[in-house]
């Protein structure tokens, strides 16, 4: 069975689907990964991430407009909309390399208007991909949906690996500074010195985004791909399909019970509430107190844990709901423990021991791996649904992410529930 699942596929189409998925959030991830360098030149300073978080949430306007468009427009061709979105994001990523440090005066204060504007454009594409890109993969055989999901998860890992080579986030020691109006010297982390500039980094991001555009072009034009498409029944309530699809592959659709259908949507919303809203906001609070090594190991290994867990979809059938329930319980338990560590910052348990470092890294790896697997399981479950299942999965994804991000924005920036850890905490008198 395993040999049959791996042989009855076209590796070229797997690669094209993976690169197509890679381009969904790569622009947003690229900006976030460069923040340790950008905040030192941005007028907003350390408040810049808060602005970017809100811009990503405003970008949910994209899925809303697309939903209204498909509902009230007789002619709707998702293929051309995807072409336009990928082309716009490619241009935005390339423009970032030249404009990320440009500022302008707004209401009497300097702001990183170019960076924020381009962030909104890339986030608009990322948010819309949840309700457009993934449902479009229903036009292809089920086995290629896993490749798309792996690519979607790999965008963070690829850029994190590049950032590690660049030297972003590396520990550079502490320096003495005297703040205006104070006679005291304070130890603060030194400004990082990268091996290459953010300009080169964003050029690489633009290149990868261009490859994503070309991959989607290949998915729609190459003859070998057309043979792997599926002809869906015209009576099905789905997004528009390609009329040139081959009827040689038929999908064994099955309609899920109504309770399971809505329960699974709630499950994916909760998963995204955690993975896109809560967990990214508290990762530094839960990991940094254990040291820079533990923190960077966590960021790097968790970025590959998700895609690696998703890749299990190549070797197994669609997971049962019972298994997803068990894994969901484990995710909630691990998330609660991670939240506990974040609340205990800057002095969490086992802080100055190797056991604490190992504990926090392993917990984050398990948590992100389980989240990736459950996301894959739910997506493949709805892939076999004859309705607009994947579309509603995308809607639930954005709703959960939006609620989580808004809640954490308030808790982190206003409620001050979490206290930051600094490796240079001790001031000295002049």
Image (spheres, rainbow, N blue to C red):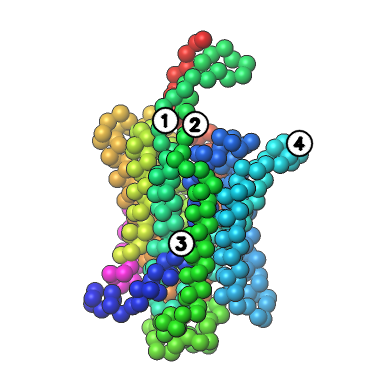
264 to 58, vertically: above or below: below
Relative to 86, 140 lies left or right:
left
Q: Is residue 123 visible?
A: no
Q: Which residue is more in the foreground, 397 or 158?
A: 158
Q: Quadrant of the N terminus?
A: bottom left
Residue visible at 39% across and 69% down in the picture: 15
Circle 3 Cα neighbour tier, 10 Å, few/some/many (<14 / 14–19 / ≥20): many
| Element under disc 2 | loop
Disc 2: which residue: 191
Relative to 48, 273 lies left or right:
left
Disc 1: which residue: 172
Q: Which of marks 1 and 3 is in front?
A: 1
Residue 52 x %, y %: 59, 46
Residue 216 x %, y %: 50, 71
Q: How far apart are marks 2 and 4 (CA)?
A: 28 Å
- Identity of the residue furthest to the bottom in this view: 247
Circle 1 Cα neighbour tier, 10 Å, few/some/many (<14 / 14–19 / ≥20): few
Residue 121 x %, y %: 62, 57
Residue 312 x %, y %: 30, 65
| Element under disc 4 | loop
Of the image marks 2 and 1, the number of the one nearer the N terminus: 1
Q: Distance between the residues labelled 2 and 1?
A: 7 Å
């Amino acid at each position: 069975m395993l040999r049959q699942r791996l042989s009855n596929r076209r590796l070229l189409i797997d690669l094209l689907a993976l690169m197509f998925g890679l381009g969904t959030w790569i622009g947003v991830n690229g900006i976030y990964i460069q923040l340790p360098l950008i905040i030192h030149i941005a007028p907003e300073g350390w408040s810049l991430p808060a602005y970017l978080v809100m811009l990503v949430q405003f970008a949910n306007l994209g899925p809303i407009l697309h939903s209204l468009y498909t509902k009230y427009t007789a002619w709707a061709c998702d293929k051309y909309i995807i072409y336009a979105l990928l082309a716009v994001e490619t241009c935005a990523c390339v423009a970032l390399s030249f404009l990320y440090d440009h500022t302008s005066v707004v209401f009497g204060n300097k702001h990183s208007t170019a960076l924020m504007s381009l962030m909104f454009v890339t986030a608009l594409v990322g948010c819309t991909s949840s309700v457009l890109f993934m449902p479009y993969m229903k036009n292809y055989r089920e086995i290629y949906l896993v490749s798309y999901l792996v690519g979607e998860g790999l965008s963070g890992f690829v850029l994190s690996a590049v950032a590690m080579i660049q030297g972003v986030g590396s520990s550079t020691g502490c320096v003495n500074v005297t703040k205006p109006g104070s006679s005291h010297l304070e130890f603060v982390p030194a400004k990082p010195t990268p091996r290459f500039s953010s300009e080169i980094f964003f050029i690489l991001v633009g290149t990868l985004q261009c490859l994503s555009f070309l991959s989607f072009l290949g998915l729609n034009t190459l003859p070998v791909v057309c043979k792997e498409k599926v002809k869906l029944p015209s009576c099905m309530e789905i997004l528009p399909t390609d009329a040139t699809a081959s009827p040689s592959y038929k999908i064994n659709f099955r309609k899920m019970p109504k309770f399971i259908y809505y329960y699974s949507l709630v499950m994916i919303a909760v998963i995204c509430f955690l993975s896109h809203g809560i967990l990214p906001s508290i990762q530094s609070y839960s990991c940094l107190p254990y040291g820079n090594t533990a923190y960077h190991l966590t960021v790097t290994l968790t970025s590959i844990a998700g895609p690696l867990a998703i890749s299990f979809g190549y070797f197994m059938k669609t997971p049962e709901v019972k298994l997803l329930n068990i894994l969901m319980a484990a995710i909630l338990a691990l998330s609660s423990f991670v939240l506990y560590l974040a609340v205990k910052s800057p002095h969490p348990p086992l802080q100055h021991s190797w056991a604490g470092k190992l504990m926090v890294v392993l917990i984050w790896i398990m948590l992100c791996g389980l989240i990736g697997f459950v996301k894959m399981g739910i997506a493949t479950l709805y892939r076999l649904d004859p309705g607009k299942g994947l579309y509603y999965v995308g809607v639930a994804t954005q709703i959960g992410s939006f609620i989580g991000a808004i809640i954490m924005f308030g808790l982190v920036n206003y409620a001050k529930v979490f206290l930051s850890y600094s490796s240079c905490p001790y001031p000295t008198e002049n």
